[in-house]
Amino acid sequence: MYESGPSAEQLGVLGLTAADLDDEDVEVWPCNWPAFLLFNRMSTQWRAGAGGAIGLDYSCIRDVAGFLGIKKKKLAEMFPDLQVLEGEALRVMAEERENSP
């Protein structure tokens, strides 16, 4: 199924442009798909400070997971995976800030 990529406005929130995105596909293992899907849907739920994103807003994770049909038990199991994705995203965003003019 085809989904259009993020808009320029959505990328701008993260300090990115379309040029920052790779054109190649990335494989997500089936066991990681639920965590990836939740992380993707949480893309508008970043807490931000003066220096940019500081982490996901955990107060809405249950709601977003519920919209995706993810049950509480499954959410508890996938939460560490979500934190890995969050940590890597924060690392990349910090690196981008350091390398920007």
Image (tube, grey):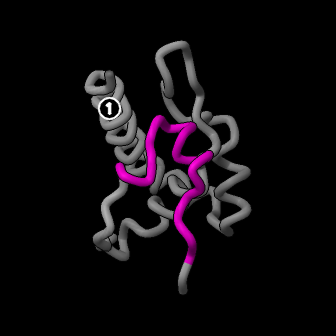
**Amino acid at circle 1:** Glu
* Residue found at the far top of this picture: 50
**Residue 69 rendering spot, x and y as whole percentages:** 68, 69
Q: Give the residue drawn at x 35%, y 44%.
A: 84
- Counting the numbered discs, the total is 1
Image quarter for residue 87? Answer: top left
* Residue found at the far bottom of this picture: 1
Judge from the rendering whether residue 93 lies leftward or rightward of residue 27; answer left or right. right
Considering only vertical position in the picture, is 88 above or below 69? above
Write down the region rendered in magenta: 3-20
Check the picture and name the quadrant holding the N terminus.
Answer: bottom right
Q: Give the residue drawn at x 73%, y 51%.
A: 63
Check disc 1 and report the residue beneath it. Answer: 96
**Residue 23 rendering spot, x and y as whole percentages:** 32, 68
Of residues 75 and 67, the one drawn nearer to the viewer in this rendering = 67
Q: Give the residue drawn at x 38%, y 47%.
A: 85
Q: Secondary structure at mark 1?
A: helix
Packing grade of label 1 (10 A; few <14, some 14-19, many >=20) is some
Q: Give the residue drawn at x 68%, y 35%.
A: 59
Considering only vertical position in the picture, is 45 above or below 62? above
**Residue 36 rendering spot, x and y as whole percentages:** 45, 61
Judge from the rendering whether residue 1 lies leftward or rightward of residue 93; answer left or right. right
**Residue 37 rendering spot, x and y as whole percentages:** 52, 64
Image quarter for residue 93? Answer: top left
